[in-house]
Image (cartoon, rainbow, N blue to C red):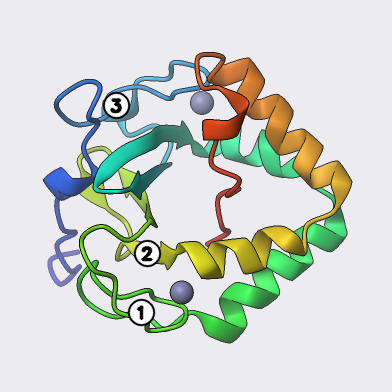
Amino acid sequence: MGDEPELEPIPPLLHSVFLDGPFRSCSVCGEDLMLGAVPYQIQKVWRNREVVFEMAVCARCCVDLLRQFSRESLEKMKGFVEKHYRPVAGVSVCHFCAKILDEGSEREIEAVCSMARLLRPVVVVCADCNAKVQEDLSRKTREAWGDFMDRNFPGVPRQMEPENTPLLF
Ligand SMILES: [Zn+2]
Ligand SMILES: [Zn+2]
């Protein structure tokens, strides 16, 4: 057990702006994320230096959402990640196209976490790469995502919603 690498703490960049601190509960079911019973995914989107969307969703709720996506969409998302994902350190480069992102560029950062630690390195996606994934998604998948947003983030006006469904890791 002793040689297990220590997991890195979640960087403040991935804390909740709304809570002004780490995410503590699942944005969907309210599960206490600090108990460590389930891993969870954080997704944050920046546009013009501002966070326009953030959520932390537990693995159970992620699975429920993905079940409503079409099989074809899931395969395309998976294919995109397998083909283009090139992990690099830092958050100022897109991990899919290697484009350098200046401070004002739109970007999305995703992370898989358990309690206060990262289970894997954070993933950075630029707006162009995100758009590429989204345009390939089926209508069924887009509708499932739209319903998910309406149900869980009713305060977010439709035009402000990220089109970006979370990527699969
Ligand atoms: Zn949940
Ligand atoms: Zn990119």
Q: Which residue is mark 1?
A: 87
Query: Mark 2 and 3 residues: CB-CB less than 8 Å, in contact?
Result: no
Labelled disc at residue 123: 2
Q: Which residue is mark 3?
A: 35
The x, y position of residue 17, in whole percent, is 22, 29
Q: Examine the rendered structure and indicate whether residue 31 appears above or below residue 59.
A: above
At label 1, the amino acid type is Pro
Determine the secondary structure under disc 3: helix
Q: Earlier in the sequence, mark 2 or mark 3?
A: 3
Q: Examine the rendered structure and indicate whether residue 13 appears above or below residue 103.
A: above
Query: Mark 3 and 1 residues: CB-CB less than 8 Å, in contact?
Result: no
- 164 left or right of 141? left
Query: Does any portion of residue 144 appear in the rendered image?
Result: yes
Q: Which residue is located at x 21 percent, y 20 percent?
A: 19
In three-dimensional space, the C-alpha distance between marks 2 and 3, rounded to whole angstroms, equals 24 Å
Q: Which residue is located at x 20 percent, y 40 percent?
A: 116
The x, y position of residue 141, in whole percent, is 79, 45
Q: Earlier in the sequence, mark 3 or mark 1?
A: 3
Depth order, front residue of 17/86:
17
Q: Is mark 1 within 8 Å of ligand 2?
A: no
In three-dimensional space, the C-alpha distance between marks 2 and 1, rounded to whole angstroms, equals 7 Å
At label 2, the amino acid type is Val
At label 3, the amino acid type is Leu
In three-dimensional space, the C-alpha distance between marks 3 and 1, rounded to whole angstroms, equals 29 Å
Q: Which residue is located at x 73 percent, y 61 percent?
A: 135
The crowding category of the residue bearing disc 3, from other C-alpha atoms within 10 Å (few below 14, some 14 to 19, many at least 20), is few
The N terminus - image quarter? bottom left
Query: Mark 2 and 1 residues: CB-CB less than 8 Å, in contact?
Result: yes
Query: Does any portion of residue 10 appear in the rendered image?
Result: no
